[in-house]
Image (spheres, rainbow, N blue to C red):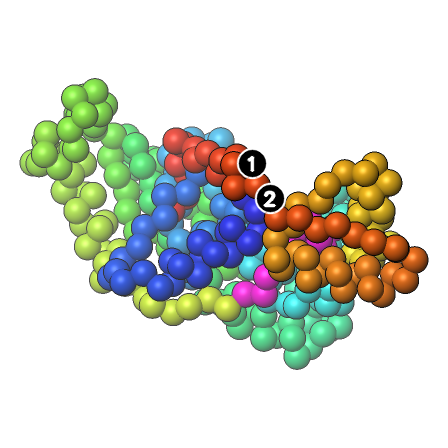
């Protein structure tokens, strides 16, 4: 999903005239999934009592914490550079805990880093353990809790333990909600109590985060202006028509007016019949909400 498309969706979500908005997000730890997850301080993660599920949940929370902290600072700020360097060190095999990174940040940027830490304390993801078969499965949840506290320095909250119920796959096969197919089942009663708990603890606090446009911030050191100029020079050399929106026209003209050595540039509106539907497909798999 493009940055401005995501930005538009997020802005419109805030304007919805609704008591509750549920975002059923796809699996994985992509930037888009995390940014939608961070529309609330208390996003929900559904896990199963399996080691792979617990490790995936921790990986997602780790990416979320770094993303949240990264977006506490403006674009191209020295604070972001420190966080980027820590990620590069991790790729080189020199992994530091988030607590160690923030200690360095607080010493180097005491005012902004401490403010970011205060915001971090508001971040409290909630976890639901699904398909539990015994009380021993609760231990898997404790492992995730301890791992997150020790490595990421944030708290998570368990809001429900959903037992495995053989009636669930049957209700799926019959294409009937479990609340209708087996309203007296233990699964349904636990689900109802979790829903009531979620509703009673919903907060309307908005999270303010700085924008991140990865495709722009990860450009090489030549600078964004030079990259755009090189691209337009290439297109003009190839005698290729350039189709731009009105906003892009203004930006392009400002760049080329400062370049000085460009003789002309033809900017055309796209044909109304030339557009193609490139809307992103949605994943049927669900891991976070």
Left or right of 239? Residue 202 is left
Q: Is residue 224 above or below residue 161?
A: below
Left or right of 286? Residue 56 is right
Left or right of 205? Residue 244 is right
Assess whether residue 210 is covered by the magenta stretch: yes
Image spot of residue 131 (x, y percent): 30, 32
Q: Which residues are magenta?
A: 209-218
* Residue 61 visible, this orientation: no
Residue with the mark numbered 1: 274
Instruction: Point out the residue furthest to the right here.
Output: 261
Instruction: Point out the residue furthest to the left here.
Output: 184
- Judged from the image, the secondary structure of the residue bearing numbered disc 2 is loop
- Give the residue displayed 13% in from the left and 37% down from the top: 179
* Residue 282 visible, this orientation: yes
Front position in the image: 187 or 179: 179
Image spot of residue 261 (x, y percent): 92, 58
| Rendered image quadrant of residue 271 | top right
Front position in the image: 270 or 202: 270
Image spot of residue 18 (x, y percent): 26, 60
Q: Main secondary structure of the magenta part?
A: loop
- Judged from the image, the secondary structure of the residue bearing numbered disc 1 is loop
Image spot of residue 161 (x, y percent): 28, 42
Q: Is residue 262 above or below residue 140?
A: below
- Give the residue displayed 33% in from the left and 44% down from the top: 128
Tell me the crowding category of disc 1: few under 14, some 14 to 19, or many 20 or more residues within 10 angstroms, Cα based: few
Residue with the mark numbered 2: 270
Tell me the crowding category of disc 2: few under 14, some 14 to 19, or many 20 or more residues within 10 angstroms, Cα based: few
Assess whether residue 262 is covered by the magenta stretch: no
Front position in the image: 200 or 218: 218
């Amino acid at each position: 999903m493009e940055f401005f498309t995501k930005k538009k969706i997020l802005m419109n979500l805030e304007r919805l005239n609704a008591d509750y908005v549920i975002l059923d997000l796809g699996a994985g730890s992509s930037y888009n999934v995390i940014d939608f997850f961070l529309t609330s301080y208390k996003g929900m993660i559904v896990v199963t009592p399996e080691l792979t599920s617990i490790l995936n949940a921790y990986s997602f929370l780790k990416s979320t914490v770094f993303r949240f902290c990264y977006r506490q600072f403006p674009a191209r700020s020295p604070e972001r550079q420190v966080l980027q360097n820590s990620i590069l060190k991790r790729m080189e095999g020199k992994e530091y805990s988030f607590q160690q990174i923030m200690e360095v940040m607080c010493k180097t940027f005491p005012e902004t880093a401490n403010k970011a830490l205060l915001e971090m304390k508001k971040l409290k993801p909630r976890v639901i353990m699904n398909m539990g078969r015994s009380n021993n499965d609760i231990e898997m949840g404790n492992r995730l809790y301890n791992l997150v506290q020790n490595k990421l320095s944030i708290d998570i909250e368990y809001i429900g333990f959903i037992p495995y119920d053989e009636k669930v796959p049957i209700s799926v096969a019959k294409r009937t909600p479990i609340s209708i197919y087996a309203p007296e089942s233990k699964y349904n009663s636990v689900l109802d109590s979790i829903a009531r708990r979620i509703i009673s603890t919903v907060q309307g606090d908005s999270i303010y985060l700085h924008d991140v446009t990865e495709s722009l911030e990860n450009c090489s050191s030549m600078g964004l202006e030079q990259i755009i100029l090189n691209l337009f020079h290439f297109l003009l050399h190839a005698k290729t028509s350039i189709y731009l929106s009105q906003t892009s026209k203004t930006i392009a003209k400002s760049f080329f007016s400062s370049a000085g050595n460009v003789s002309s540039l033809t900017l055309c509106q796209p044909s109304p019949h030339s557009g193609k539907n490139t809307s992103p497909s949605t994943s049927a798999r669900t891991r976070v909400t």
